[in-house]
Image (spheres, rainbow, N blue to C red):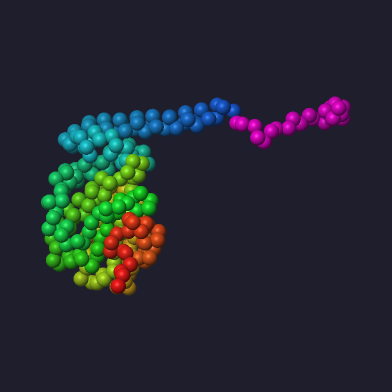
Amino acid sequence: MAIRTCLDLGRPLIVPVSLTKSPPRNCKFSVQSCSLSSNQSHKQLVVEVKEKLGRDYHSLPVGKNGRDDEEMILWFLKDRRFSVEEAVSKLNKAIKWREEFRVSELSEESVKSIVDTGKAYVHDSLDVYGKPVLIVVASKHFPSEHDPVENEKLCVFLIEKALGKLAAGKEQILGIFDLRGFSTKNADLTYLTFLFDVFYYYYPKRLGQVLFVEAPFIFKPIWQVAKPLLRSNASLVRFCSVETVRKEYFTEETLPASFREKTL
């Protein structure tokens, strides 16, 4: 009767829409299709980069971390926002650097003398976010005493070691600079720049965050000089306390020994 009355009065018939009605099934398929299409597109770009590297830079090595390493190619494509030209250019430089630096030849034994200083190491446990942890103890770094080439080898060896601890689905590591006891004798702008440059050029977006722990006042002017040199990586730095490290990044079981509270 109500419907007839509306029609009789010349009003348009309004059909109520159920708010609980399920969306058409084809919406679900369209999302899946979009995802599949995106994955297919990425695979095509990987093939395109691989073919271009083989064509334009055929002297580059092949195999793991070589010009035909599809996993590595995909990572650099992601870094370069899927620009084939930019990914090819950056991969060419990265693969050449790995060959010249002899990254594949680095081992615990080859860097033993500098490892024994205790200035840097990869922590045994992951942080609470599942990231491998690379720790640098600044107070044990003496640029006037340690060979800079050995320092660089240690840096790259530890990055490779940390990345080797990545769990499935994880892509980044956590860096911690323990600045307790830091003095001018430990200041090394060249080494700090090298470390961040390595991540920027050769391990793009592998560094998730960097903690500068308990930075003393004397470190502030050094950071002001270093910050512009680190480019986008500078935004990854967080100044924090030991307490922050304890509460936000580790459990009681996984906390590095040097950050545990000392008992009398």
Looking at the image, residue 60 sits to the left or right of residue 203; the answer is left
- Identify the residue at the far front of this view: 264
Work out whether residue 160 can be spotted.
Answer: yes
Q: Residue at x 43, y 30 (%)?
A: 36
Quarter occupied by residue 6: top right
* Quarter of the view holding residue 254: bottom left
From what the image shows, is residue 208 above or below residue 58? Answer: below
Please state, as top left, top right, bottom left or bottom right, where the N terminus lies in the image: top right
Q: Magenta stretch: residue 2 in it?
A: yes
Asked whether 157 falls inside the magenta stretch, the response is no
Write the start and end of the magenta stretch as one range. 1-23
- Give the image quarter of residue 10: top right
- Residue drawn at x 23%, y 48% as measured from the top left: 160
| Residue 85 appears in view | no
Tell me: 196 left or right of 22.
left
Q: Position of residue 195 (x, y in %)?
A: 25, 56
Tell me: residue 91, above or below residue 108. above
Foreground residue, 105 or 194? 105
Residue 220 in the image: state x and y as whole percent: 32, 69
> Which quadrant of the rendered structure holds the C terminus?
bottom left
- Pick the residue in front: 89 or 135: 135
